Amino acid sequence: MKWSDITAIAEALYDAHPDIDPLTVRFTDLHHWVVSLDGFDDDHARGGEKVLEAIQMAWIDEAR
C-alpha cells in the first residue's frame, strides 16, 4: 500500500480498529497506524496533513 491508496488504507484501518471513532484520532496516531499496517510500503515522510485528512474522511465513510 502507498499513501495514494486512500480507500484501501481506510478499509484496513477500519478492520484493525473497529471500535475507534475516526473523528477522535489525532493525526500523529493516524500516521503511526497507517505506516504500521501490513502491506504498507511507502516513504513515511510523505504522509502529510492533507493525505492524513483524506484517509480520515475515507475511514469515516467506511465506518458508516
Image (spheres, helix red, strand yellow):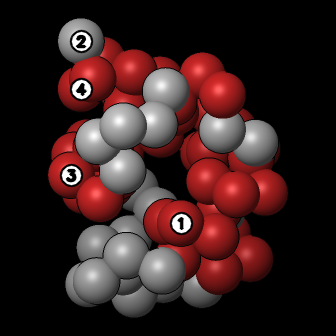
Question: Callout 4 environment at 10 Å: few (<14), some (14 to 19), or many (20+)?
Answer: some
Q: Residue most toward the top?
A: 64
- Above or below — where is 10 with respect to 61? below
Dot 1 corresponds to which residue?
A: 33
**Nearer-the-camera pick, 53 or 30:** 30
- In the rendered structure, the answer to whether residue 19 lies left or right of residue 33 reads left
- In the rendered structure, the answer to whether residue 32 lies left or right of residue 45 reads left
Q: Which kind of residue does numbered mark 4 sit on?
A: Glu
Dot 2 corresponds to which residue?
A: 64
User: What residue is drawn where x is 28% and y is 83%?
Assistant: 38
Is the residue under label 2 in contact with that under label 4 (CB below 8 Å)? yes
Dot 4 corresponds to which residue?
A: 62
Residue 5 appears anywhere in the view: no
**Nearer-the-camera pick, 18 or 64:** 18
Q: Which kind of residue does numbered mark 3 sit on?
A: Asp
Residue 52 image offset from top left, x and y in percent: 62, 44
Q: Residue most toward the front?
A: 19
